[in-house]
Amino acid sequence: GGVERLRELSESLGEDAAGTDAAALREVAAHPPLECSLQLTAHGERPAAEEGERAVPLVASILLRVRLPVEYPKTPPVLAIEDVMVTTQEPLGRDKMLTTVARLNEDALVAAMLERAAATLPEPCIYEVATCLTESALEAA
């Protein structure tokens, strides 16, 4: 497959740029960036609006697109939140329409994930980025 071929070529290039196979180098450079989508779930709660009310448990379903640049993990991935749905954890009645119950600040979440990635580099950072998102997504819901 494409990824296996890319791995073979990358490993064959080694660390010595002067002694590399020019055709292999061109093939690696022409390969499109690797990209994937992660479906993540975050749990949290909306605080009670008034005295005596209870907090509302929330769950967020988040689709995160991750593009790995050629220089990864020396440079951070490109991150984009593609979709977010926030619902209560209570069962939805048959007469209820599924709609999000909160809006997330997606720009702030991406900025926080990139900050976490920068602190992790040059080590791979996808796990750290995903953990950052699931831990902080519902903090301001």
Image: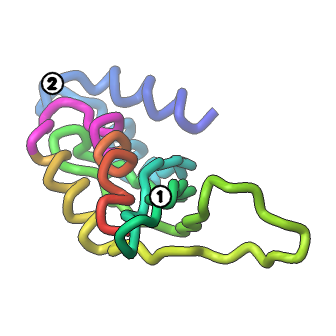
> Circle 1: is it few (<14), some (14-19), or many (20+) Cα within 10 Å?
some
| Quarter of the image that includes the N terminus | top right
- Residue 110, x across and y down, in percent: 29, 64
Residue at the disc numbered 1: 65
Residue at 26% over, 32% down: 124
- The stretch of residues the image draws in magenta is 119-129
Element type where label 1 sits in the image: strand
Of callouts 2 and 1, the N-terminal one: 2
Numbered disc 2: secondary structure: loop
Q: Is residue 120 magenta?
A: yes
For disc 2, the neighbor class at 10 Å (few under 14, some 14 to 19, many from 20) is few
- Judging depth in this view, the residue of 47 and 124 nearest the camera is 47
Q: Which amino acid lies under the numbered mark 2 shown in the image of this protein? A: Glu
Q: Amino acid at mark 1?
A: Arg
Residue 9 versus residue 115 in the image, above or below: above
Instruction: Find disc 2 in the rendering and name its residue.
Output: 15
Name the quadrant containing residue 25.
top left
Residue at 34 percent across and 21 percent down: it is 12
Closer to us: 95 or 59: 95
